[in-house]
Structures are given as structure tokens and as C-alpha cells.
Amino acid sequence: MTKAKLLRTHMTERGLVHIMAAHSPLSAIVAEEAGFDGLWASGFELSALYGLPDMSLISMTQHLDMLRAIAGRSSLPIVADIDTGYGNAINVIHAVGEYERAGASAVVIEDKTFPKVTSLVAGGRQELLRVEEFQGKIEAAVATRQDPDFLVIARTEALIAGLGEMEALSRGQAYAEAGADMILIHSKKKDPSEIESFSRAWKGPVPLAIVPNAYPDLDAERVKALGNIRMMIYGNYGIRAAATAMQETFRRIVADGGVQNVHRDVMPVEDIFRLQDRGRTKDAEKRFLR
Ligand code: SPV
Ligand code: MG
């Protein structure tokens, strides 16, 4: 069974899948060990890793390199965040081919203009494409995939752009008609009311995906009660957790004048060896180094 088929099966059987953001193979391995159903190859996380804002500054090649490296070290299905698809429908055709070959099981394409501005930043410039143009991009993605189980997920930023629920619903419907397998509805409201209202009003033919970054109170139990959300993406928690841990540890080392205290609170290096799959190279050394 392909990973894409597995992801679809899990959504059907479990009702809801939990997808963790990753910005590196190490974060992906940690997510897999924690028990997530899949990985989100996040544009925000990779941008932050480079110390850059999430504004189409990271190239497709950089993102693909990350995804390929993750696919080589994790057995989880990967949902690729390809932003706007790197341009028009022609760019989408190229991107979908590359991402599927690199090991992605799904792509999420958002209906903003290229270059985009990250969704959650206050006062961000949020411009949406014409519906017909974005439908063309979805149709191009669907026509390009090789594996029929590879998911094409259309993300509408209508709520992010302040265009209201009616616009978000009609865009979602139009994208489903263009062949999207799911609609990702995003919101930057600090409470889940917009998402709950959209989800109740959604009568489209495909299920929904959400990214509860701005509205953390919407947990899995509440999501399941809404009925039509099948995917929860924890969009920036990998990089935020990593940055929190590094900030605290680095400050303590400076304050303490050494690592004499923090060493007890960070992962032992033996655990890093395990995450690096050191055992495999050890075996290979024994077998092949003469
Ligand atoms: C990402 O993780 O890159 C996302 C989610 O797209 S968000 O940053 O909340 O828009
Ligand atoms: Mg993104």
C-alpha cells in the first residue's frame, strides 16, 4: 500500500488524522516516535529555520531537499505545504511532479497570489487569486499526479483575507468542483468560532483540513464533534518547540557560565545517536570495513 493510500485509509478508519509539522528529518523522526499519523512539510517552519519570514523567499529546491531528506528517514506520509504552487498552473504541474517523485503523499496549494505573505502575521498583505485561475491550478495538480491516491488539498485563505464565510464557502465549493480531494480552511482568529461556523455550514462533497495554530482551544474531541474535518495539522509547533528549548538552554549556559546545570535537562547524546540510526552504520562497519 502506498503512503498516500495509507493516509486516506487512516482518515476513513480513524475519522481524523493528526499531522505534525516538520522542518528536518530529525523533527520528523521525533514526530513519528511520538505517534503522529503523518508529517507536514511546513513552509513556515523551513523559513523560520533559515531565520526568514514565510514570504516565498525559500525556494522550491530548498523545500524539496528538506522533504526528500525527511522521506528518506521517516515512514510517515508527508503532506507538502507548497504555498501558492510557486507560480501559475504551469508551475504547479512542475511542482506536483517534483513533490510526488520526492516522496510526498499530498500537496496543499493555497489560493493566494505569488509571492505570498504568511497567514498569521498582523497586517500581512493577503491577496487572493481569481477563483477560475485557482481552479485551473487545482485541475493541473490533479491531472499531474501519478498515484490516484496522492491527495490534492486546496487551501482557501478567504477568512485570512477578511472576505468572510460566504466567500470561503463558495471558494471551497469551486475548488472541490475542480477536483480537490480536501479543502483546507485557515483562520487567524484567536478562538475557533470562524472554523466551527465554516465547518457547520460546509456542505461540499469533500472533507476539511484545519491548522489550529491561532485557535489552540479546538482540540480533537471538539473537531470530531463537528463531523467533517478529517485532518488536523499542527502547523508551527515543531519550530516553536525547538526554538523554546534552544532559547532556554542557551540563556542558562550563558547565565551559569557553563553547561554544568543544563546537561541534565537536555537529551543525552546516546539518544541523539539512536535518532541518527547509528546502529545501522555500526553494523555496516562490522560487515564491510576491512
Ligand atoms: C505552515 O506551517 O507553513 C502553514 C501554516 O502554512 S501557517 O503558518 O499557520 O499558515
Ligand atoms: Mg505554509
Image (tube, grey):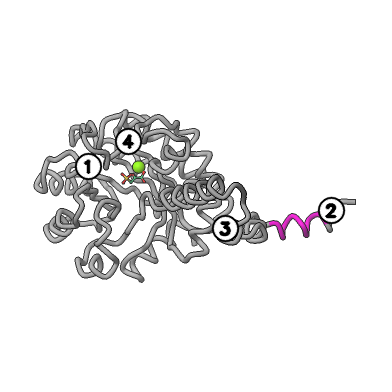
> For the view shown, which residue lies furthest in the front direction?
256
Tell me which amino acid carries mark 3: Val
Q: Earlier in the sequence, mark 3 or mark 4?
A: 4
Quarter of the picture for ligand 1? top left
Tell me which amino acid carries mark 4: Thr
Q: Which residue is mark 4?
A: 84
Give above or below for 38 relative to 97: below
Q: Report how far apart the C-alphas of labels 2 and 3 lie in the structure.
A: 34 Å
Q: Earlier in the sequence, mark 2 or mark 4?
A: 4
Q: Residues within 10 Å of mark 1 (few under 14, many from 20)?
A: many
Q: Secondary structure at mark 1?
A: loop
Q: Which residue is mark 3?
A: 266
Tell me which amino acid carries mark 1: Glu
Q: Which residue is mark 2?
A: 288
Q: Report how far apart the C-alphas of labels 1 and 4 lie in the structure.
A: 11 Å
Point out the frontmost of discs 2 and 3: 3
- Residue in view at x 46 percent, y 42 percent: 99
Residue stretch in magenta: 278-285
Q: Which residue is mark 1?
A: 157
Q: Secondary structure at mark 3?
A: loop
Q: Report how far apart the C-alphas of labels 2 and 1 lie in the structure.
A: 53 Å
* Magenta segment, prevailing SS (helix, strand or loop): helix
